Amino acid sequence: MQRLLRIEIAVLLGSLPLLAHVGSPDIFYEGTAGPYRLLVTIRPPQVIPGVAEVEVRSVSPEVRQVRIVPLPMTGPGARLAPVPDVAQPSHEDPQFYTGSLWLMATGSWQVRVSVDGGRGPGTVSVPVPAVSTRMLAMQGTLVAVLIPLGLVLLLGIVSIIGAGAREAQLEPGEEPDRPRMRRARVAMAVTGLVAVGAVWMGNQWWTSEAGVSQRNLFKPLALRATVENGGTLRLRLEDPGWLNRQTDDLLPDHNHLMHLYVIRLPAMDRVWHLHPELTAPATFTQALPDMPAGRYALYGDIVHASGFPDTATTELDLPAIAGHALTGDDSAGEGPRLDEADYNRNVALLPDGDRMVWERGPGPLRARQAYEFRFRLEESSGRPAGGMELYMGMQGHAAIVSPDGSVFAHIHPAGSVPMAALSLTTPGLTMPGMATANPGGGLNPHAAHGMVSGEVPSEISFPYGFPKPGPYRLFVQVKRAGQVETGVFDTRVEN
Ligand SMILES: [Cu+2]
């Protein structure tokens, strides 16, 4: 009983979930399901099996019905869909649908959203990593109620069996004789032993189940960072042991196996978006650019073959690096020091004279709400910037970081879903690199995933919601005339 109690009240609490982004478990996806444009928000449970909350906002008014169903990302289960649930339209907003779905197993899942309406059917599948990030503890008051109730039951069964053996066959008013009394005592002893045995076996079962859950608790990949030869960063992915995760099964996500954000601490005034090369199994190397001495936070985004995303993080002290010029898709940006942050500023002045404007609404931003974050690039005259290009096949990239490092999210116009995972659920989507200029102009089908070709607009939007209140810094990157521009913004999110 003691042990049972101890296990029940054991608090096995990690910090906020650390995966695919850090501390930002909710999934935001903006794209099309057939002819309909949707914003899908999925809030996965903290414990698997558990219930995921799904919200679907339709931009198109012709939608009549939205159905949702969870499926494994890969394997035979991905082709055998159970009967979907019908999402409920909101009373206030008929274009807003909600539903909840059970995610039964740990791993890489997708939520298939099927839409029916005036323009025919449409379907989109949103990847969802399902992991247990904590074990829920039993509440103290519940323990205080259940233990006495359990004892009452235990003593109750013993005394009922005893009374039955002693008096069940007596006439009213008749006293039990000695043999009956003895038989009753034997029956009570046996019942007591059986009952205690049942509790012991229950405890064994509970302990083994708790052990399974404990082993299934998500453990982030570790990142071991060292600097060699005065300027070569070497990163090793190390698996602390979690289910059957591998470190050598990575998928390229917009052309790179790893997207590494390096942010100077504690000021967060310098950022680098780098793409280390895989040089040995689970080992990446990167020629560092010029960097001042100091402490840096590293966030390495990768995607496994199953579509499961991981963010490996670490911090690193660096001497001053006289490094190489940035090449390829690597980029750098600068902003004000965090201790001089203006949380209401909505214009970022860029080194070449352009400005990035955050079109933020008046009121405060609230935690756990899905928003469209809109930015536009303009020239110093206020004219929309021309000559916009795709940066790694996308209109833009944004990193959202909390100063204490508890939140890191790397998002795109299609949302927080990694493109590599999306390509597994949406076979029609070819991978980046295909984002070549479209001679006819206009948007190609990949615009559905925030990948545009032809004329690239100077306005960009990202769907996202902050996981908790507090200060955040946003690094927003777009590309113009061969140059990556980084706008740095700050905001304080309220509850
Ligand atoms: Cu990106």
Image (cartoon, grey):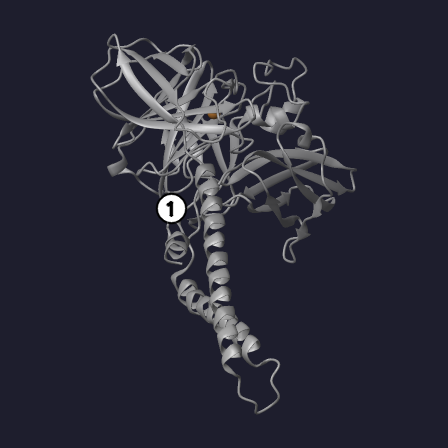
Q: Is mark 1 on a helix, strand or loop?
A: loop
Q: What residue sits 77% from the left and 43% below the top?
A: 117
* Number of marks in the rendered image: 1
Residue 350 visible (yes or no): no
Quadrant in which the N terminus is drawn: bottom left
Residue 276 location (% of width, % of height)? 40, 15
Using the rendered view, name the quadrant where residue 466 is placed: top left
Q: In the drawing, does residue 165 fall left or right of residue 328?
A: right
Towards the viewer: 7 or 474: 7
Q: What residue sits 62% from the left and 81% below the top?
A: 169
* Residue reaching furthest to the bottom: 173
Q: Is residue 170 above or below residue 284?
A: below
Q: What residue sits 42% from the left and 19% below the top?
A: 484
Using the rendered view, name the quadrant where residue 68 is placed: top right
Residue 128 visible (yes or no): yes
Residue 165 location (% of width, % of height)? 56, 75
Question: How crowded is the residue under tag 1: few (<14 C-alpha within 10 Å), some, or many (20+)?
Answer: few
Circle 1 residue: 13
Q: What residue sits 57% from the left and 76% below the top?
A: 164
The amino acid type found where label 1 is placed reads Leu
Residue 332 location (% of width, % of height)? 36, 20
Using the rendered view, name the quadrant where residue 262 is placed: top left
Q: Is residue 95 above or below residue 258?
A: below
Q: Is residue 21 above or below residue 456?
A: below
* Residue reaching furthest to the front: 179
Towards the viewer: 240 or 8: 8
Label 1 beta carbon less than 8 Å to ligand 1: no
Residue 439 location (% of width, % of height)? 65, 13
Towards the viewer: 41 or 25: 25
Q: In the drawing, does residue 115 fall left or right of residue 323?
A: right
Q: In the drawing, does residue 253 fall left or right of residue 355?
A: right
